[in-house]
Image (cartoon, helix red, strand yellow):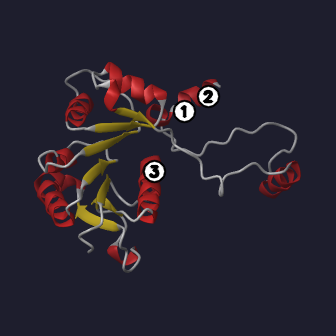
Amino acid sequence: MDSNRFRVAHICQSDDPNVGGSLSVARALVREQRKLGLDARLIFLYRANSTSDRPPNNTDSLWCDVERKSRWLHGVPRLRRILKQFNPAIIHHHDGILWPRLATMTLGRPLVTHGHLGLPAQGFFSPARLTQFVVARTTDRLIAISEWVASSWERGGFPKKRIWLIPNGVETNRFFSRSSGEKQALRKQLGLPVDCQIALWVGRLHREMKGLDRLVAT
């Protein structure tokens, strides 16, 4: 390991693609930061894909490999050991859960939180609000993916001057407008009508997290 390289740790729940947008954002950041010469790593908390499925010599990922039921007992010390060995200059949380904070809040490193969600709707003494309370007080900078997320955190008492608004982008080399001929050909291939509008949903089927009620209303 090159001791002169600036190190950044990106903490995610798992390497399971079903985790959703937070994993995509973390991977994109690591890819771009490594292009800039930084030693950026993904640190996965939970055991997901088997170790045999992982690519050999994967230099951009580290695994905490804890089971969810033993995360408090084994996860906190194991994550602390990994971070102390890696010795990052910045720790970037993409996880939005409580126990990793107990491992990182006393390491003396700047903590960045990627805010994909706003203030929880549950009561103040709910687990979700407790987690948000601890996360807010252990976050040096918040990256909000939307104005709604930013304003929600601000309403919850997080200082506006420590919020960076960086909306999620689109990989235009993968997602771009097709010609009308290509669209019609694709619809025929998929057995879809060619003369009406089609609403396509690419998120998880989860009303509270993904706002499916708004899609139905639309």
| Left-right relation of 201 to 47 | right
Amino acid on which the number 1 mark rests in the picture:
Leu
For the residue carrying disc 2, how many other residues have a C-alpha within 10 Å: few (<14), some (14-19), or many (20+)?
A: few
**Marks 3 and 1: which is nearer the front?**
3
Percent of width and height locating residue 216 = 61, 28
For the residue carrying disc 3, how many other residues have a C-alpha within 10 Å: few (<14), some (14-19), or many (20+)?
A: some
- CB under 8 Å between callouts 2 and 3? no
Can residue 120 be seen in this snapshot?
no
| Left-right relation of 164 to 71 | right
Amino acid on which the number 3 mark rests in the picture:
Val
Amino acid on which the number 2 mark rests in the picture:
Val
Q: Which mark is residue 25?
A: 3
Q: Name the residue under label 2.
A: 216
| SS class, disc 3 | helix
Q: How far apart are marks 2 and 3 (CA)?
A: 27 Å
- CB under 8 Å between callouts 1 and 2? yes
Q: Mark 1 points at which residue?
A: 212
